Image: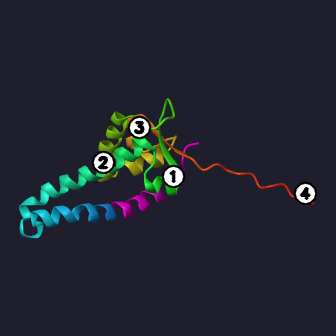
Amino acid sequence: MPATVSTRLLCLLYEGVILIGLGVLSGLPFVYLTDYPHHPELRYGYRIYLITIYAVYFIYQWRHRGQTLAMKTWHLQVVDSHSFSPPRYSQALKRYVAALCCFVTGLNVITLIFDKQHRWLHDIFSGTITITTKVKVAAPANDE
């Protein structure tokens, strides 16, 4: 079942919190080893370093489980739109690059709202879909 817009947006907010933590933790070695505060010319190198760390995080999680930590919390999963299995590495890479470009421009949110299937633009580009994994359980019958 496709995920709802509100669930996706809440997951996006939670993913942002996780990325802040990941950025701080992975940035510490770079700052310590390069003496970054005294070398502002390393600014672009630091950005490339963080983008690479984030790429490894997302691509690995999407490929192996189909979920990041935030997606697992909100019961979402990324799957191939044809086989419904976790995306291939090429799809995960396309999804990451498209997401990076689309979130910077804001096109993703517009597509999510106006697309009939409520897909992110990076899902359209990569041939993936985001589904919900939460199974609705029926209430037990009252046998009184």
Q: CA distance from mark 3 to mark 4?
A: 48 Å
Which of label 1 and label 2 is nearer to you? 2
3 to the left or right of 67: right
x and y percentages locating residue 99 in the rendered image: 34, 46
- Residues under numbered marks 1 and 2 in contact, where contact means CB atoms less than 8 Å apart: no
Nearest to N terminus: mark 1 or mark 2? 1
The residue labelled by disc 2 is 56
Q: Residue at x 38, y 36 (%)?
A: 126
Q: From the top left corner, tell me how far across and down residue 53 is, in percent.
A: 26, 52
Label 1, label 2: how many angstroms apart (C-alpha)? 26 Å
- Residue sitting at the far right: 144
**C-alpha gap between disc 1 and disc 3:** 15 Å
Q: Is residue 18 magenta?
A: yes
Q: Which residue is mark 4?
A: 143
Q: Which residues are magenta?
A: 1-19
Q: Which residue is mark 1?
A: 5
Of the two numbered discs 2 and 3 on the same chain, state the one appearing first in sequence: 2
Q: Earlier in the sequence, mark 1 or mark 4?
A: 1
